[in-house]
Image (cartoon, rainbow, N blue to C red):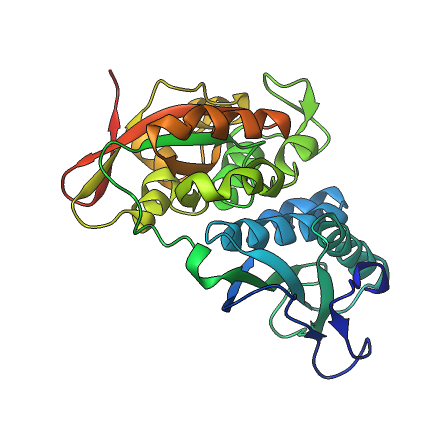
Amino acid sequence: MRTTRTALAVGEIGAFGGMVRVPAGFEHPVLVLSTDGVGTKVLVAARAGIHDTVGEDLVNHCVNDILVHGARPLAFLDYLATAQLEPETAAAIVSGVARGCQAHEMTLAGGETAQLPDLYQPGQYDLAGTIVGVVEERKALHGDLVRPGDVLIGYASNGLHTNGYTLARRIVFERLRLDVHDEFPETGRTVAQVLLDVHRSYVTAVSPVLARLHALAHITGGGIAGNLVRILPEGCEAVIDARAWRWPPVFRVLRRAGAVSLGEMRRVFNLGIGMIAVSARDDTEAVIAAAKRAAVEAWIIGEVRPGTRAVKFAER
């Protein structure tokens, strides 16, 4: 926790509440808050005995959730619940949380560790977090700027991120009968490496061009359709060109091995798109160039059209 304390941190570590100052320079600062978890990805971490990556997953997921509103992260709180506290495991988890906070110059202001033996099986734990960010009110993104004719830009994910693990585990461990140290098909990497890839943060790819964007959607549970629709105003539909990018191998393997329908794949997984930006057509080159400078691949994947508020896929 000490390694994450920024100049905005106030108070003592271990107090009943964590404190941070609102940064100077805001005329009308608005706090942006979000809470989330990493779901059953923690079961893969426990199976592999690798616990630091899920902490970083948690931070990056929450950072992306407030980034879509244009917010800068200020402080983070984590919640770890387990049957019985194992100090080495807890230290690894929190080290991952701290690493994620440091990467975003954000204070880890506190948290809670709960021992609940009647609720969890030995060796199991759950992990969740809450983030606080700030944005200038007039610069906050809500989706109200989206218009027909806008372009959809997809940012590459680096794997499953933190969604779809109940289905993915069933396919990998039960259908394919693989374990964490076995090779994951078509990747040349182990199952643990593929399934524990850290949820990508899009801060460096997106922040330089926030002023050019009309909206952002973080693609998590519910897939592209379930998340992109949340930023569409009435009278607008988003049309996705389903052939604009190629699914990463992990998703192709899961679909084939699990005999999963295309519809379910789209509902459960991000399919290689972790964030979608909406911009005017004249700004697309600048948006994609900013992503490239941050070493994040990005593509034009569709457009906004007049219509009923919905997300549609065009197969060409």
| Quarter-of-image position of residue 83 | bottom right
Task: Provide residue 77's location: percent of width, then percent of height.
Answer: 66, 67
Observer able to see residue 269? no
Q: Residue at x 66, y 74 (%)?
A: 116
| Quarter-of-image position of residue 125 | bottom right
| Left or right of residue 3: residue 227 | left
The residue nearer to you, when weighing 252 against 116, is: 252
Task: Provide residue 135's location: percent of width, then percent of height.
Answer: 52, 60
Q: Residue at x 56, y 63 (%)?
A: 134
The residue nearer to you, when weighing 28 against 274, is: 28
Q: Quadrant of the N terminus?
A: bottom right
The residue nearer to you, when weighing 277 against 96, is: 277
- In the image, residue 240 sits, relative to residue 135, either above or below, namely above
Q: Quadrant of the C terminus?
A: top left
Task: Provide residue 3's location: percent of width, then percent of height.
Answer: 85, 59
In the current view of this chain or complex, which residue is farthest to the bottom? 16
- In the image, residue 238 sits, relative to residue 10, either above or below, namely above
| Left or right of residue 53: residue 301 | left
| Left or right of residue 4: residue 286 | left
The residue nearer to you, when weighing 240 against 236, is: 236
